[in-house]
Amino acid sequence: MTTSTIAILGAGKLGTVLARLALAAGHRVLVAGSGDPESIRLILAVVSPGAEPARAVDAVDAADVVILALPLGRLGTVPATALRGKVVIDAMNYWWEVDGTRDDLGDLRTSTSELVQRRLPQSVVVKAFNHMGYHDLDEGPRPVGAADRRAIAVAGDDPHAVATVSALVDAWGFDPVPAGSLHDSIELEPHAETFGANVSAGELEEMLERFPSTLRGLEVTLARS
Amino acid sequence: MIDVDFGLDTFGDVPSDETGAPVSHARSIRQLVDEAVMADELGVDVFTVGEHHRAEYSVSSPETVLAGLATATRRIRLGSGVTVLSSDDPVRVFQRFATVDALSGGRAEVILGRGSFTESFPLFGYDMADYEVLFEEKIELFARLLTERPVTWSGTTRAPLTDADVFPKTEQGLSTWVGVGGSPQSVVRTAKYGFPLMLAIIGGQPQRFAPYLDLYRRAAEEFGTTAHPIGMHSPGFVADTDEEALEAWYPHFKVVRDRIGALRGWPPVTRSEFDREVASGSMYVGSAETVAQKMARTIHAMGVGRFDMIYTSGTQSITDRLRSVELYGTTVIPRVRELLAEMPARPAVVTA
């Protein structure tokens, strides 16, 4: 996976940070904003130099792995057909201050990544890079084995896709920590202890382990029983 | 060395009184007058109040507060930080600030923003789905109103205007900034209109924002607009010793941070996260010397032309707040200027 092509949909705070991480690891990186690629050319040149602006469909076509880094409320705008057969990393969160109050996104019976998977039935969705704040992601990459290396949780239903994404997480400077299925990825969403976590793999694993006994965990169990 | 302006910013956090009980919103607002008057007397360059619509904060109508400050102060510039333009009417915003400008003898300035809090949207009947278009259209209209000539405009977010002349006129134009929290698109938009940029840097290492300064300058170059000196604002608190500052600030910061965090799904903040922010992040908390050293390092590394400290954080006591303002004005600012003068010159900042 050393020189594979990464497409990032979303050229905001998170998208431009992820682009830097991918570029630093030697990938070709294509970034699509919400409109004309020309409108993000300068932004990428200055903030994520080396990343290429592209239309979403073109970026997706060229990519081995696609990252969704746009507001979850804009999920409807991602090119589902072009994403067929691709590994898609869902780095998004339900953020009511941007997305508005949405009963479907706040429903504890399903994780938001399951909703993303439903919207992209022919893609393989993996949740990753959502729980760490973008500035911690930016400051966080460390080489393998560094004492202060931080961890990123990875959740998904397809073991191959999870392995692919975990390898990327590792190559981009973080320890990948398995976090179960897409259904389980509610443990990585806002209101879970892991949300915002900028901690070591050991600490992240402990947070995931104790999730069922937290207030949020109990609410989720209740909603899902 | 580039001239640096120093400001104090607040959202009008409700402080606590001598007994530790939170004061009323009304008293919170009067407290701002005392603090602004002190800042004015101590030579602080600018005082801003930011719009919020939550119980923790007393300022929902910045320009009304500023109008009060206008007649109580003499030299200090009076700003909003920010005015949530998306959920306001650009014509009224202009009129209200032009009025403050008249009352203050040309000291008003507006910082337009989208706001990281969006309580104003449901309150005033706006749809979050229109978040982008509301700001995009309204900043465009506001830029035209600033010409202070009759405006003809149409869009989707307010009634059209035909040769609308808007009053009062100002004596020397209305100083207008745009506050940006970290969206590169917002930086480019600010440059497109040639407005000065105010960066909200409220967490993490400030140097992380350096590419945004570069982006602003390069975008201004492409658009053929002016790249003004850039401002930044970050939270801070000054007390007589480092320990006193940390202990007096942390509990109040934590209460408000955790309350707002709970709404956003963040777990409670920990002391070690706080200590990290103070040590290497974006909180300027400590003795006057500690805060001055940190401010000088940041200002120099970033090459900003303005540094505003968000000097209130939750239910601090009125006494602690006043003392912080006093130390900021009497000791921190002169010391930062002194430290900056000793530092090697930076490469010239592009200003046109």
Image (spheres, coloured by chain):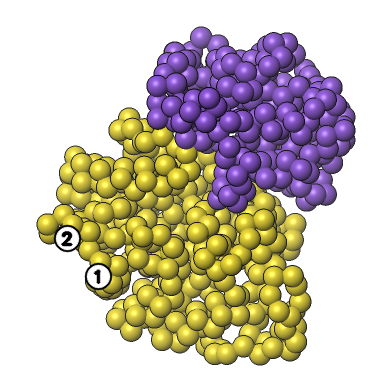
Chain colours: A purple, B yellow
Q: Amino acid at mark 2?
A: Asp
Q: Nearer the viewer, residue B156 or A3?
A: B156
Residue B343 is left or right of residue B185, and the answer is left
- Which of the 4 image quarters holds residue A113? top right
Secondary structure state at the residue bearing disc 1: helix
Please tell me which residue is depicted at 50% across the width and 81% down the height of the picture: B96
Q: Amino acid at mark 1?
A: Arg
Q: Between disc 1 and disc 2, whose residue precedes?
A: 2
Q: Chain of mark 1?
A: B
Report the residue marked by disc 1.
Answer: B27
Q: CA distance from mark 1 to mark 2?
A: 10 Å
Residue extending furthest front? A225
Residue B34 is left or right of residue B350, and the answer is left
Q: Where B273 sits versus B128, above or below?
A: above
Please tell me which residue is depicted at 36% across the width and 42% down the height of the picture: B258
Report the residue marked by disc 2.
Answer: B17
Instruction: List x then y, in percent, for residue A123.
Output: 79, 25
Q: Is residue B262 visible?
A: yes
